[in-house]
Amino acid sequence: MSNKINAIRGMNDLLPKESALWLSLERTIFDLFISYGFKNIRTPIVEKTDTFHRAIGQATDIVEKEMYTWADSNGDLLSLRPENTAGVVRAMIEHNLPREGIQKVFYQGAMFRHERPQKGRYRQFHQIGAEVFGADNAKIDAELIAMTHSLWQGLGLKNVSLEINTLGSAEARANYRTVLVDYFTQHKALLDEDSTRRLSTNPLRILDSKNEDLRNLIETAPKLMDYLDEASAKHFEQFKAYLECLNIPYIINTRLVRGLDYYNRTVFEWTTTDLGAQGTICAGGRYDGLVEQMGGKSCPAVGFALGLERLILLLQAQNLSVGKQPLSIYMMALGDAAQLKSLQISTQLRQALPAVILYNDITLGSFKSQFKKADKAKADFAIILGEEELNNNQVAIKPLKGQGEQQRMNLNEIVNYLKEQK
Ligand code: ATP
Ligand code: MG
């Protein structure tokens, strides 16, 4: 009988075999966002439950059934963050940041939702997101799209499309809500259990239903687009004009309402058909009312989050790698004196060649077994320090991939030789 403990269902280990791709992807995204003028923000993984209730909305899937919530020993209700916009907004208000001018921030990290685990859907998953506070024009909405678009291009991704919609103002949505409730009430017999409940709590969310049986009913429902207020309609026109000028194709999806209550005006999703049902890799929109709703001074805002697991799955499905594989060398030594010297030499090599991966042999076996280890590490070169090399103040270098003879060189020559590779 085994008494080993496994991880929690839907919460995955990231193992060394796969983590290189994650790291390269994260670095690529961070560098891109930084180049667009975003600065990193990190908020706690745990917040008061109220933070999420107020931001996300009571009648949403997340708050109704997906949050990990418990009472702290002093009775406070706390939750693991299911998303990070709520925490960022809380921090913006707490530290008065929007008062200092426009804030462009990005975050990264684990989010937690108690969902049914399946491919592309986990209970702990990771997002990188960006938020902009203090700008209400469509130019910034479009710049966020441009930034994500250039990410897909830089990664070489194919088959991703942009879906956009507008949710108008709070008032326009309230008017539309009445129309929508009338419509669905007329067809009440066709609704499923979830949607019947939503009819009284959050009718717009019916449009977001993933139930295929409701597709026709939703398709022919009245469209918010026809009930827009003038300012939101103009904002949407401007948003589209920017996208056209950027040459970024889009699809208007009037059913796109997003799963969180805080959005208004622009909403968007980047989707792919390569990942089955979990096809949204990035989603966001404008949430001009949220800062005030959470107790801050009114401040327009817009942002998005991308799902890293889904992005990784998509890269793998399309056979794409990220970044350049660095050169690697395996440093071997035999004998006590050579072992001592090899650590010294490897320090010098690391300083001269900071981008190179240097594996120092720590098995202390025969050269034959060290060569096996070097192959296993998939090293490009072996650097060898035996008695003879030691006596001549040299090392030997041998290419491990393809052809090439073993050669003796001094340290400077080695550095120059390796700099010329790849
Ligand atoms: P979905 O409709 O797929 O449930 P969502 O609308 O709940 O997505 P958001 O809250 O907008 O998702 O989160 C932004 C992105 O985070 C999603 O587009 C997706 O890529 C990713 N994401 C959301 N939930 C999960 C999850 N449970 N597992 C993995 N990734 C997720
Ligand atoms: Mg969801």
Image (cartoon, helix red, strand yellow):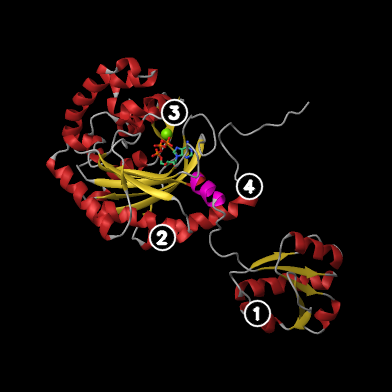
Image location of residue 88, percent across then percent down: 35, 44
Task: Name the amino acid, label 2.
Answer: Leu
Q: Is residue 237 above or below residue 223?
A: below
When asked about the image quadrant of residue 35, the answer is bottom left
- What element does badge 2 sit on? helix
Q: Residues within 10 Å of mark 2 (few under 14, many from 20)?
A: some
Q: Quadrant of the C terminus?
A: bottom right
Residue interval drawn in magenta = 310-317
Kindly report the secondary structure that dominates the magenta region of the rendered protein. Answer: helix
Viewer-side residue, 169 vs 244: 244
Residue located beneath label 4 in the image: 15
- Quarter of the rendered image showing ligand 1: top left
Q: What is the spatial separation of the Cα atoms under label 4 and label 3, in whole angstroms?
A: 26 Å
The kind of secondary structure element at disc 3 is helix
Q: Which residue is mark 1?
A: 415
Q: Nearer the viewer, mark 4 or mark 1?
A: 4
Q: Earlier in the sequence, mark 1 or mark 2?
A: 2
Circle number at residue 166? none
* Residue 174 in picture, x, y percent from top left: 19, 29
Among the two numbered marks 2 and 4 on one chain, the one whose residue lies closer to the N terminus: 4
Report, in whole angstroms, how far the alpha carbon at label 1 lies from the one at label 2.
31 Å
Task: Measuring from the top left, give residue 84's x and y in whole percent.
Answer: 39, 41
Q: What amino acid is found at the position of numbered circle 1 in the picture?
A: Val
Find the distance from the CA under tag 4 to the CA under tag 1: 32 Å
**Distance in Å between CA atoms under marks 3 and 2:** 31 Å
Q: Does label 1 point to a residue whose CB lies under 8 Å from ligand 1?
A: no
Comes first in the chain, label 1 or label 3: 3
Let me know if residue 316 is in the magenta part.
yes
Residue denoted by label 2: 32
Which amino acid does the dot numbered 3 rest on?
Glu
